[in-house]
Amino acid sequence: MKNIAKALKYQHWTLLWSVFILILCNMKMPDTQGSGIFFEGFDKLVHLGFFFVLTILLFYGKIQTQRSYEFRILTILKVVTITFMLGGTIELIQWKIFTYRSAEWWDLGCDMLGVMMGVFSYVILHLMNFDEKKS
């Protein structure tokens, strides 16, 4: 129990953002066809953005817990697994419970693209920090 508390200590923004994603992805949205504000594929861009921010928040909490930018492949695997499970759960909920929303593989694909962008950012941050330590 103490390990769970330690792991979640710096993840409060991540948890809030996850709830925010769950709510918005399962809300009934107004008809936006022809409104001029939204474009075809806007939904996919939103999924990508949601999961990019989620990934960054997960890494931020992990960095705060570790008190370092130490690079760990296991951390990346955990983040990818957690975000995939959340994205998959959202699509399953949309498919089985909130049937007024459409469950789409493309949404999950865009979720994972956002995650990969976040992972890329984490790796670049690590490499930049590593290079600074060498100098």
Image (cartoon, rainbow, N blue to C red):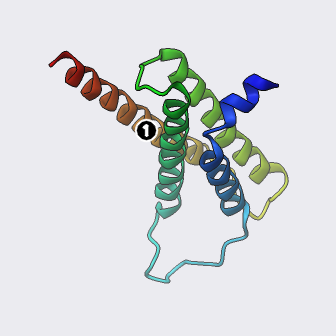
Question: At 50% across and 55% down in the image, what residue appears?
Answer: 44
Q: Is residue 77 above or below residue 14?
A: above
Question: At 42% across and 19% down in the image, what residue appears?
Answer: 71
* 135 on left or right of 122: left
At numbered mark 1, what does the secondary structure look like: helix, strand or loop? Answer: helix
Q: Residue 19: image x %, image y %?
A: 70, 54
Residue furthest to the left in view is 135
At label 1, which amino acid type do we have?
Gly
Q: Residue 88: image x %, image y %?
A: 68, 39
Q: Residue 9: image x %, image y %?
A: 66, 37
Query: In the rendered image, which quarter contains the C terminus?
Result: top left
Query: In the rendered image, which quarter contains the N terminus?
Result: top right
Residue furthest to the bottom in view is 35
Q: Is residue 133 above or below residue 83?
A: above
Q: Quadrant for residue 8, please give it.
A: top right
Question: At 24% across and 20% down in the image, what residue appears?
Answer: 133
Between 90 and 58, the one lying in front of the other is 58
How many marks on residues? 1
Q: Is residue 20 above or below residue 133?
A: below
Q: Quadrant for residue 111, please give it.
A: top right
Residue tagged 1: 118
Question: At 25% across and 28% down in the image, what residue appears?
Answer: 128
Between 48 and 52, the one lying in front of the other is 52
* 102 on left or right of 80: right
Q: Is residue 59 above or below residue 131?
A: below
Q: Residue 20: image x %, image y %?
A: 66, 58
Q: Crowding near pointer 1: few (<14 within 10 Å), some, many (20+)?
A: many
